[in-house]
Amino acid sequence: MNKKYRVKLSQEDWIRIQAVQSSQSTTKTVRNRCQVLLLLNESICPAIKHTEISKRTGVSGTAIRETARNYCTQGIEYTLRPRVHEKPPVTPKVTGEKEARIITLACSTPPEGYARWSLRLLTKSVIELGIVDSIGVETVRRTLKNKT
């Protein structure tokens, strides 16, 4: 199979990759991209096959192809940039006042017939009181754990 994007690192790019890879503040994803680029480099010797790179680095074939494409079309800075998400993929259900109400409920005395609040009982009560429309036990647990 002919490769569409062939990576031939210049001396400057190779030095930049080595610097980024050795930096302690570099994320694992960016380190993996550095390793992939070094293994794809054809300027010294023929590149290693994508399957071999995948085995060595633990990166998928798609990620290898994307890294090569990004380097060839966008350059080294674009390829090695950390991806930053502006907002979380899912907006949190429990924030501010709702969180305070759940904590207050958990600190109050349990309903009659119960010795203490369980997570399931607390979740059921939160829904019944209309604090939130629906909520999972794990969300209630995390809300309480973050504030203790």
Image (cartoon, rainbow, N blue to C red):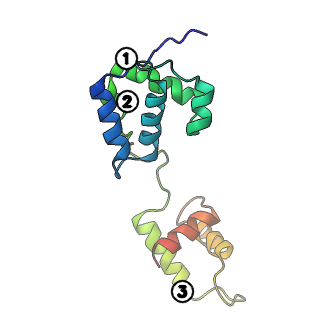
Q: Is residue 22 left or right of residue 41?
A: left
- Apparent side of residue 111 relative to residue 145 in the rendered image (left or right): right
Neighbor class of circle 1 (other Cα within 10 Å; few <14, some 14-19, many 20+) is few
* The quarter of the displayed image where residue 49 is located: top right
**In the rendered image, the vertical position of residue 112 relative to residue 68, given as above or below:** below
Q: Which residue is mark 1?
A: 73
Position of residue 87 relative to residue 125, above or below, is above
Cα–Cα gap, marks 2 and 3: 53 Å
Q: Which residue is mark 2?
A: 79
Q: Position of 143 compared to 7: left or right?
A: right
**Residue appearing at x 50%, y 11% in the figure:** 4
Q: Amino acid at mark 1?
A: Thr
Q: Residues under labels 2 and 1: Cα distance?
A: 9 Å
Of all residues shown, which one is farthest toward the front?
44
Label 2 amino acid?
Answer: Thr
For marks 2 and 3, the one nearer the N-term is 2
As rendered, which of 26 and 106 lies closer to the eye? 26
Q: Earlier in the sequence, mark 2 or mark 1?
A: 1
Q: CA distance from mark 3 to mark 1?
A: 60 Å
The picture places residue 13, in percent across and down from the top left corner, at 31, 28
Q: Which residue is mark 3?
A: 108
Q: Secondary structure at mark 3?
A: loop
